[in-house]
């Protein structure tokens, strides 16, 4: 009997350790970014995307931070996003570039940051986000796409609870 209790305790500890390591690993994922057209020389070079939290928690704010650089000053423009789930378009939106970063954008490195809350009913899984940066006259400054995941859990103030 004591051996069974010991075995259950050991298995429980292994399971908890696995969950902990998996959550630590998930938060330190790097997001692979690809250009929409590898042959195009874009005026804005995207050097990285950081998503917090990663994976995304439904019903909680998510921040997308895009690190970039440019060889020309940008006085204004728009950001457009298209989100696909299993290849099907599920969301598109347009933002004023100057509300997501300081304008005018000077030559060199800069950061674009956008925070958004996904509804609690958003299906879990992997999504693809396509981001275009457009100058005020409509000229495409950059176009990238990357995948992000929405977790199977809904976050709540006291911690993380399973979907109901």
Image: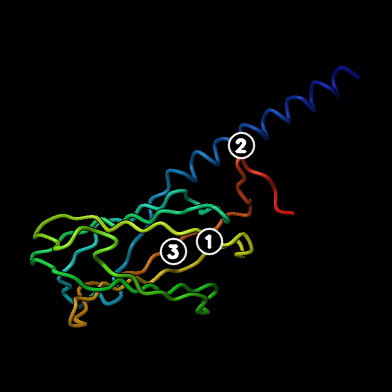
Proximity of marks 3 and 1: CB atoms separated by less than 8 Å: no
Q: Which mark is residue 147?
A: 3
Residue 1 versus residue 57: which sits nearer the camera?
57
Extreme residue toward the right, this view: 1
The quadrant holding residue 46 is: bottom left
Horizontal and vertical percent for residue 96? 29, 70
Q: Which residue is mark 1?
A: 118
Name the element at disc 3: strand
Name the element at disc 2: helix
Q: Residue at x 8, y 64 (%)?
A: 71
Q: Residue at x 73, y 30 (%)?
A: 12
Q: Residue at x 23, y 72 (%)?
A: 142
Number of numbered tags placed on the structure image? 3
Instruction: Work out how far the residue at label 3 is from the one at label 2, CA to CA, in angstroms.
Output: 24 Å
The image quadrant where one finds the C terminus is bottom right
Q: Is residue 70 left or right of residue 150?
A: left
- Up-down: is 93 above or below 108? below
- Up-down: is 61 above or below 44? above
Proximity of marks 2 and 1: CB atoms separated by less than 8 Å: no
Q: Label 3: how many residues lie within 10 Å, few (<14), some (14-19) or many (20+)?
A: some
The quadrant holding residue 32 is: bottom left
- Up-down: is 121 above or below 55? below
Instruction: Work out how far the residue at label 3 is from the one at label 1, CA to CA, in angstroms.
Output: 16 Å
Extreme residue toward the bottom, this view: 138
The quadrant holding residue 104 is: bottom left
The image quadrant where one finds the N terminus is top right
Q: Which residue is mark 2?
A: 18
């Amino acid at each position: 009997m004591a051996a069974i209790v010991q075995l259950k305790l050991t298995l429980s500890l292994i399971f908890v350790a696995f969950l902990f390591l998996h959550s630590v690993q998930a938060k330190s994922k790097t997001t692979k970014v690809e250009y929409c057209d590898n042959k195009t020389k874009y005026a804005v070079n995207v050097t990285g995307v950081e998503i917090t939290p990663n994976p995304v928690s439904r019903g909680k704010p998510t921040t997308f931070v895009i690190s970039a650089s440019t060889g020309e000053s940008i006085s204004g423009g728009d950001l457009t996003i298209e989100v696909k789930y299993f290849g099907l378009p599920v969301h598109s939106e347009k933002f004023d570039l100057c509300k997501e970063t300081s304008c005018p954008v000077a030559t060199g490195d800069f950061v674009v940051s956008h925070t958004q809350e996904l509804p609690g009913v958003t299906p879990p899984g992997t999504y693809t986000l396509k981001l275009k940066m457009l100058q005020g006259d409509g000229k495409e400054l950059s176009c990238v796409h990357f995948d992000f995941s929405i977790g199977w859990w809904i976050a709540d103030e006291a911690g993380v609870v399973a979907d109901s």
